[in-house]
Image: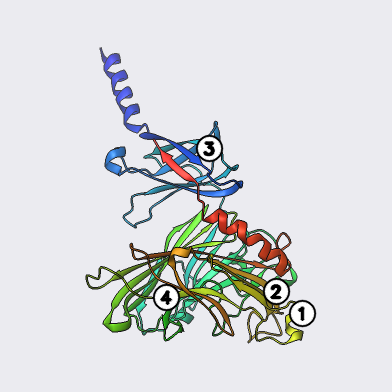
Amino acid sequence: MKRLIFLLMVQSLCVAVMAQVKTLQVTVTNTWNGDKVDEPVAVKLPDAKKVGFVAKSATVKCKGKDVPCQLDDMDGDLCPDEVFFLADIKGKDTKTFEVKLSDKKAKKEPEPRIYTALQIRDKQDKHPDALRVEAPGKSFLFNDIYMHGITVESELTGYRIYFDHRQNIDLYGKRYRRIELPQTQFYTSEEQLKEGYGVDVLWAGNAIGCGSFKDWKKGRPENWTDVAVRGQRIVTAGPLRTVVEVYDLGVEGDDDLTYSMYQRYSLYAGHRDLQVEVRFQPMMDVKVFDKLFCTGVQKVGATADEATRKGHKSEGFLKKNGLAASWGCDYPDMGKKQLWAPEPVGLAVYVPKDYIKDKKEDDLNYLYVVKPDKDNAIRYWVSFCADKEEKGYHSAKEWFASLEDWMEGVSRPVEVKVK
């Protein structure tokens, strides 16, 4: 009898420590003719009440083989909302994945292919990590944020968004496909340059840069000066994707219109392009958010002399289909010409036609004037290449020729169904 009681106790204990598991069958279909490599797949999870527990880890398999993944909390309530992974899918093909959720933490995380940083500049030069930085709109924290803003990097490219009224997207180009920003921090030293590290490759000045999002006033781009609160935060930091948010609360617009704006930037492992989603919240009950904004690309090297251009003619285009691009060469930092040589780069932005209300070209920029949709949102994509890349594009002809397929690919995401 004692032995039976003991066995029952052991059995109860085993049941208590066993992980709770929920299995989902996920089908991913590529409706496009082209093959997809490292295609982002986001599986929205059922509510925790439906699952029966709060998931703390996830595994993904395809035909019995492990697929690296990450579990993400997208709304900041400490409960995961999505499982994210990358898939290679041929054109017009479908793959089935088995996603398992568990209430136990994972023993090992996938190797990181993404870098994300929001760091504070301190006297000890330790640059402590932050998840969110928020300040009154008139406060100038630009020099107090290490790297001057939130920063993301894939194996191919790096970006940062300035923590100030400009909110410009700055670019980091590199020779080799690897993660470098933990070492260079966007300010590559002379020694690191000799070792083959990348560098900041674009000086925007008064131009739009590469896909920076601006207000549109009096027929030209304007910075975000009249805001009550500005902030930046990390939504999710990898290892396969990073999502960061730049937000402005209490923006003073035209005709006494006050609103808040949330810009989300997503970068995926294996990708050079940055996905942008901007959402607006009018402060009053406004049924139609009738407000214009703009984005686009600058004319790289348009103001440079022939010696600086190094044979790279400044050229580009602005199409009705929402694709704008440029190619040129100029100094990436006008204050460090002795250290950083002129950099040839290609820029691109794709804005779906439904958002476009006008297109403008001036001496510095190719611009799209855009308006939010019925959900008070705007979505577009940004991309660039650096001539210094070993495996990249090295002329305007090569860069421009690649962009129609890129535009078609990002506008045709895979279809995801969950059972």
Mark 4 or mark 1, which has the lower sequence index?
4
Mark 4 residue type: Phe
Q: Is residue 35 left or right of residue 106?
A: right
Q: Residues within 10 Å of mark 4 (few under 14, many from 20)?
A: many
Q: Quadrant of the C terminus?
A: top left
Q: Quadrant of residue 219?
A: bottom left
The amino acid type of the residue labelled 1 equals Lys
Identify the residue under disc 3.
Answer: 94
**Location of residue 21 in the rendering, given as x and y in whole percent from the top left corner:** 38, 34
Q: Which quadrant does the N terminus fall into?
A: top left
Q: Where is mark 1, residue-wise?
A: 310
- N-terminal of the pair, mark 4 or mark 3, is 3
Q: Which mark is residue 344?
A: 2
Q: Earlier along the polypeptide chain: callout 1 or callout 2?
A: 1
Q: Which residue is mark 4?
A: 293
Disc nearer the start of the sequence (3/1): 3
Q: Residues within 10 Å of mark 2 (few under 14, many from 20)?
A: many
- Write the residue at 30% across / 74% down: 259
Q: Amino acid at mark 3?
A: Thr
Q: Residue furthest left?
A: 285
- Secondary structure found at label 1: loop
Q: Earlier in the sequence, mark 3 or mark 2?
A: 3
Distance Cα–Cα, label 1 vs label 2: 8 Å
Q: Nearer the viewer, mark 4 or mark 1?
A: 4
